[in-house]
Amino acid sequence: MSRLSWTKSIKAGRTLQSVLAYVALAVLMFWILFPFYWMVNSSFKPNHEIFDFPPTWLPKEFTIEHYKWALTNNRFIRPLLNSIQVALMTTAVATPLSALAAYAMARYPIPRKRALMGVLVATQMIPGVLLVIPLFITFTRLGIINKYSGLALGYSTFIFPYAVLQMRAFFANFPLELEDAAMIDGCTQLGAFLRVTLPLSIPGVVTVGLFAILIAWNDLLFSLILTSDINAMTVAVQLYNLSMSQFASTNWGVIIAEATIITLPVVILFVFLQKFLIQGLTAGAIKG
Amino acid sequence: MPDDVLSVQGTPGTRRPSRFRLPGRQRKVLTGILLILPGLVLIALLIGYPFVFAVSLAFKDLYLVKGMDSATWIGLDNFRKFFADPSTKPIVLNTVRYVIFSLLTQFLVGLGLAVLLHREFKGRGIMRAAALIPWVMPTLVATIVWRFILDGSWGVLNYSLIGMGVLEKPINWLADRNVVWWSLIIVSLWRHFPFWYVNLLAGLQVIPEELYEVAKIDGASALKSFWYITLPLLRPVIVVLFLLETIWRSNEFTTIWTLTKGGPGKASMTMAPYVYQQSFSFYRVGYASAISLLLTMAMLVFTVIYIRRTQLEH
């Protein structure tokens, strides 16, 4: 084989490889995105069309009835507002607490630091179903069952270890020289943190705040057990109840519209923050 | 750098005077402890105390129907009951099977997608982001949409497969005990693969490009350089992913419960939803606590290995 045709066949091989790669990518992306398309598509169909055969790839009779039903119904609005409050409270409590703790773990001489890190990691390995039983009993006895402050405090606690580990890595990599310069100018260590390190570590902090919101917004297990009253229940609980009830057999339209509504804020948050999210993840979470 | 050295260098008088002046290092230790204390108190109250409570419940016969204070100490009876119950074995096996299948499929898809999206092409950025969305949406929404797609009588999957002539009659994806299993794996894969993909992609990005160039000069094929360069260098990330995911998938509740409730019968029941069912559908709280304690203990090995690894790193 001459040298020329040899490089040619390699080139052909490369092209074939690229084509195969694109096909694989297309198949995967279709599988990843189809459920979203199908959710949004179905949410604009009247109930009878949802059950039509063959299925319609775009709504034949476009309707916003389901959204109207959900957004004018207090049984959906109330839980939606509850969820927003729980998510905001969670991030408001978890983010500052874990930022300070993470900085302490990165820069202060704390005794038994390794053991402490171990404890933080270990708390994340306890199954939720184990914790929810005693929490249910304790919250009932204390009278904070069906209070979303109790729920938010719970979520703040569950996110705390992860948040500390994540931001600790962030702060530990922060150039010491900058902090030293601030301290020479008269800052204390904590002052250097608040004036120099923290403002420059916004991506890490934002990631953690976002995570706290996600955890609170997405959770079902704890909210299902700790909030059953309409005035405290999260929107996930409401949607769960709806999707498991008799209502579901005929009114899938409303369920899928509500599902779309509660996904929307998450996706918007994510679109704005995905760079931070990926950066934060790659900086802290897993590094062999 | 210790504080006292700095105060020598700093301009005198700029430091805030304090009434107690501890030696620099001790003061730093104290400040550090004060900074982590609030979080630790929360952990003690909302994780530590419930954990101890659950352990004590595991040795009691608390039955919620009889009220919250009806518990008496029964020693190891809950554990004996669990090991004697004929429905235990299939549930434990289901859990193991669920973990193994989830981990393998998620690893393969996650790695495949990471490699594909590591290549340079137009639109890569938006695809990288889009592939993460299944992971940020609420689990409940994911399972609702999939229940919608997989429905046995009017789901779009059956419609499409019949329309393309692949199937002759509809399959009850979530209600047929032989099939439900695969549906669960597919949904779990869809929900959880992004975590693998994003971490593996991050791993790929730190592998120096020169290694591949050298391999190419030495005549190695793409497959060979993947096998001898990419995989070994990704190994630390892969090991950690397997450790974490073993624990998380074993403890998994929401995906399974909201997709199938462990059904039909107990065909897709695993440990965590079983604990939930025992405590909140049947009110056998003591018994459920014992099972969840066994689950925690089974995960202890993986937890210890993982903690060792994270500590080595620091």
Image: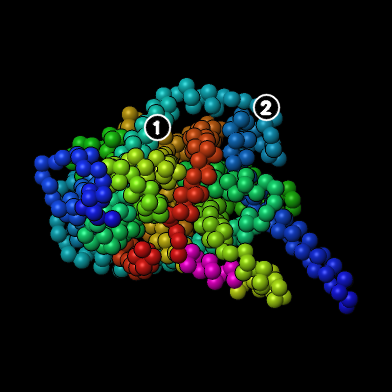
At 17% from the left edge and 54% from the top edge, which residue is drawn?
B26
Res. A4 image quadrant: bottom right
Q: Which-is-in-front pick, marks 2 and 1?
A: 1
Quadrant of the image containing the C terminus of chain B: bottom left
Residues under numbered marks 2 and 1 in contact, where contact means CB atoms less than 8 Å apart: no
The residue positioned farthest toward the bottom in the image shown: A1
For the question of whether residue B147 can be seen, the reply is: no
At 46% from the left edge and 54% from the top edge, which residue is drawn?
A283
Other-residue count near label 1 (Cα within 10 Å), few / some / many at <14 / 14–19 / ≥20: some
Res. B72 image quadrant: bottom left
- In front: A264, or A222? A264
x and y, in percent, of residue B120 in the image: 67, 54
Pointer 2 and pointer 1 on the same chain: yes
- In front: A279, or B256? A279
For the residue marked with disc 1, what is the amino acid?
Ile
What residue is disc 2 on?
A: A61
Q: In the image, is A38 to the left or to the right of B135? A: right
Q: In the image, is B133 to the left or to the right of A202? A: right
Q: Chain of mark 2?
A: A
Look at the magenta stretch and give its main secondary structure: helix
SS class, disc 1:
helix
What segment is highlighted magenta in the picture? B229-238
x and y, in percent, of residue A136 in the image: 26, 45
Q: Chain of mark 1?
A: A
Distance from disc 2 to disc 1, alpha carbons, whole Å, reads 33 Å
At 66% from the left edge and 57% from the top edge, which residue is drawn?
B119
Mark 2 or mark 1: which comes first in sequence? 2
What residue is disc 1 on?
A: A84
Other-residue count near label 2 (Cα within 10 Å), few / some / many at <14 / 14–19 / ≥20: few
